[in-house]
Amino acid sequence: MSFGDDREPRLGGWLRAHRGLVGVVALSVLLLAGVSVGGWVLYQRFRQPLPPPEGPWPQTGYLTVFLCREDDPFEPCRDRGGITAEEKRAVEAVLRTSSVIKKVRFETQEEALANFRATILPKAMKEDPSRAALLKDVEAADLPASYHGTLGAGDWNTVVQRLEGLPGISKFYLTHENFWLGKADLWIPLCPQIGGYLEPCTGHGEATAAEKQAILDRIRSLPGVDVVYFEDSAHGLKVLRHSWWHGGGTDNPAQVPESFYVKFMKPPVTRDIAKSLAGLPGLAGVWEVPGSSG
């Protein structure tokens, strides 16, 4: 088909006469192209996990004080026997008069054994039956009596200063509430650089980029996923240091796993999610977001 020799002059005249329409069409093309590119960018961003939220970092938490028992292996109690009644009263006086300790309860050795058998032992048997089998013969005398308290925001150093050096105390811990509580439902750690203590990671080494992507793809396929976060070891160490405010944790980032944290539209069944992810190389486990208990 030919427009003849005057094709370009005629076309130029038509464009000048219909400049407004041409502008609308051109703008529409640009917008459609932008939506297409922008939509792809948004899709790709959705597929990638988000970084951890900026906060908030919890300022409330929990206190646990373990008391000396007979044949206690820890240094403050070694070769001295269990806590005396007078020492126990001194410890309790500190706990009852602190302005940042909100509630305190005492747990006997018998109560500690009952709780151990009801909660800790079944979980240990499920996660590592071979090692947990050694715990079946634990008796009340093997566990310490303890105090458990809730801590409000404030000067926790005063609690530490008053408890340190008190005779009759085996160990004590002050912990903030977990950073991830309320932000995610499940914690899905990956194999760290040093991870022999995580049974699925024994002999594996750090999860590779391909393994991380495969795990992320499987997470994305789960029903009801709302948000997926990725936490690197540096942030994980920061969370540990914040949580274990006094008396625990690690300073070695190589021992801290990178992790996915997942928020669901409704509370998930952890057991079902674990089955869906089972067997993926580089996966250390699937757990509910852990928190302290008072």
Image (cartoon, grey):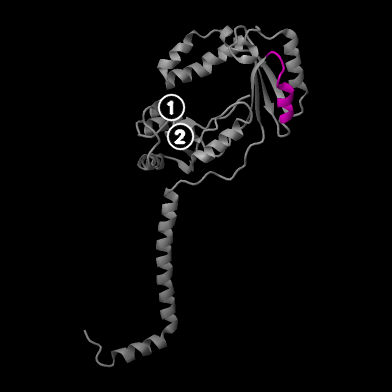
Q: Amino acid at mark 2?
A: Pro
Q: Amino acid at mark 1?
A: Leu
In the picture, the disc for residue 56 is none
Q: How many marks?
A: 2
Query: Which residue sits at x=25%, y=88%?
Result: 3
Q: Position of residue 117 (x, y in %)?
A: 52, 13
Q: Which residues are magenta?
A: 157-168
Q: Position of residue 56 (x, y in %)?
A: 62, 42
Q: Quadrant of the C terminus?
A: top right
Q: Position of residue 106 (x, y in %)?
A: 67, 16
Where, by quadrant of the figure, is residue 172 drawn?
top right
Query: Which residue sits at x=43%, y=68%?
Result: 31
Q: Does residue 217 lie above or below 91 as drawn?
A: below
Where, by quadrant of the figure, is residue 151 drawn?
top right
Q: Which residue is mark 2?
A: 189
Of 267 and 165, nearer the camera is: 165
242 left or right of 128? right
Please indicate, yes or no, whether residue 117 appears anywhere in the rendered image: yes
In the picture, the disc for residue 198 is 1
Q: Quadrant of the N terminus?
A: bottom left
CB-based contact (under 8 Å), mark 2 and mark 1? yes
Query: Is 80 contained in the magenta span?
Result: no
Binning the other alpha carbons within 10 Å of mark 2 as few (below 14), some (14 to 19) or many (20 upward) gives many
